[in-house]
């Protein structure tokens, strides 16, 4: 099976290594020193279950890689416009596209079935660029639980265990999702295919909403941002607000606040949005924070604590020149 990972950074590089180990014909779209290292020496993934040394076709130009059976997009939300502009050479008539990204996906309301069915999210996909270039019928949601970082060009470090959940927007258990899951499972990653993918999108998003603003504002890892009773109280308040929003969106999510707070203690990992701040990369504030707030206003869900911390997060990101919204 020919599979291209579009955006082989920390998460994308990890998935590319797992795909290679699982037996896929893997190619990656990457750039800069990371691309040069993969072209020269291959891709190395350092994880708890061992090291993977993957020989992958690597290019900055999707046109050099040709049509694929599947594409996994693992860029940050601000880079979606560049994906829309470049992905066409990878798409054959039956190519599926997994969007393994944080936040509310651009195709969230495709085959939603509710009052908002078919709604396009302009803030996530301005002008419908991805909708038109890829088409929502190709899209599969990918929810990633994996603490990864690029330690040096061509090298990915993975902390702890990882999990990927796949789901179709219409709730079906499709053969295309199952085929991808089988390869990745063979590559050593825990895999699930779910008929309730929106529940899983919100389950992960709630964790991003609770931890990200505190880590960015404190410029601290998960442990240090949640060690004080005051920040834990803020986290609990945001979790309650975000859970109310998820319920209003028709998703049944129940996260134990004590377990969520405890899970951050002792964890030195920095969430990806803080890594973006420190590395000077555009921050995916709209997909993770602003779009949920817009949905909350539409559904009359009050989120005062989250709204304040997001406003401060935007101030911090603007001051670093990494956000213009």
Image: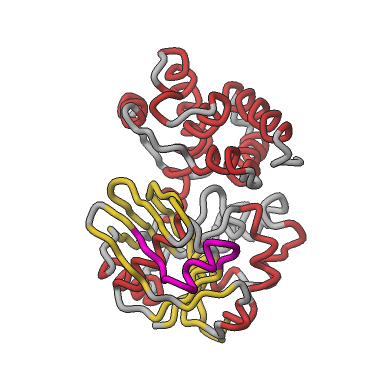
Residue 168 in view here: yes
Q: Position of residue 280 (x, y in %)?
A: 64, 43
Residue at left offset 68%, top offset 64%: 82
Task: Give, as a single range, the part of the protein colored magenta.
Answer: 30-45
Q: Quadrant of the C terminus?
A: top right
Residue at left offset 48%, top offset 78%: 57
Query: In the displayed structure, would residue 67 be above or below residue 313?
Result: below
Query: In the displayed structure, would residue 25 be above or below residue 60?
Result: below
Picture quadrant where residue 296 is located: top right
Given residues 232 and 170, the one toward you in this image is: 232
126 vs 216, left or right, is right
Query: In the displayed structure, would residue 115 be above or below residue 206?
Result: below
Q: Position of residue 88 (x, y in %)?
A: 64, 78
Residue 302 in view here: no
Picture quadrant where residue 227 is located: top left
Magenta stretch holds residue 110: no
Magenta stretch holds residue 40: yes
Q: Position of residue 27 (x, y in %)?
A: 47, 76
Residue at left offset 49%, top offset 19%: 234
Given residues 202 and 147, the one toward you in this image is: 147
Given residues 230 and 48, the one toward you in this image is: 48
Residue at left offset 29%, top offset 73%: 22
Q: Main secondary structure of the magenta part?
A: helix
């Amino acid at each position: 099976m020919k599979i291209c990972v579009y955006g082989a950074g920390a998460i994308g590089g990890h998935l590319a290594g797992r795909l290679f180990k699982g037996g896929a014909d893997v190619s990656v779209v990457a750039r800069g020193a990371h691309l040069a290292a993969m072209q020269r020496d291959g891709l190395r993934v350092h994880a708890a279950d061992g090291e993977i040394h993957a020989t992958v076709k690597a290019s900055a130009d999707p046109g050099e890689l040709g049509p694929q059976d599947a594409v996994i997009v693992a860029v940050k939300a601000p880079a979606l416009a560049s994906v829309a502009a470049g992905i066409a050479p990878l798409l054959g008539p039956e190519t599926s596209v997994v969007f393994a990204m944080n936040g509310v996906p651009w195709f969230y309301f495709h085959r939603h079935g509710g009052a908002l069915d078919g709604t396009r999210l302009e803030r996530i996909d301005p002008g419908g660029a991805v909708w038109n270039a890829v088409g929502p019928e190709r899209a599969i949601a990918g929810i990633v639980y994996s603490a990864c970082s690029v330690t040096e060009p061509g090298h990915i470090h993975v902390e702890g265990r990882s999990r990927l959940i796949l789901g179709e927007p219409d709730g079906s258990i499709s053969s295309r999702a199952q085929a991808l899951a089988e390869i990745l499972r063979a590559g050593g990653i825990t895999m699930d295919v779910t008929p309730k993918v929106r529940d899983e999108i919100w389950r992960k998003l709630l964790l991003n909403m609770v931890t990200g603003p505190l880590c960015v504002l404190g410029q601290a890892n998960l442990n240090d941002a949640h060690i004080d009773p005051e920040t834990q109280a803020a986290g609990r308040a945001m979790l309650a607000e975000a859970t109310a929003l998820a319920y209003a969106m028709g998703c049944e999510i129940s996260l134990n606040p004590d377990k969520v707070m405890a899970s951050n203690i002792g964890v030195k990992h920095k969430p990806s949005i803080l890594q973006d701040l420190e590395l000077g990369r555009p921050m995916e504030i709209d997909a993770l924070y602003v779009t949920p707030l817009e949905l909350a206003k539409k559904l009359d869900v009050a989120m005062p604590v989250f709204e304040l911390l997001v406003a401060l997060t935007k101030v911090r990101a603007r001051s670093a020149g990494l956000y213009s919204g």
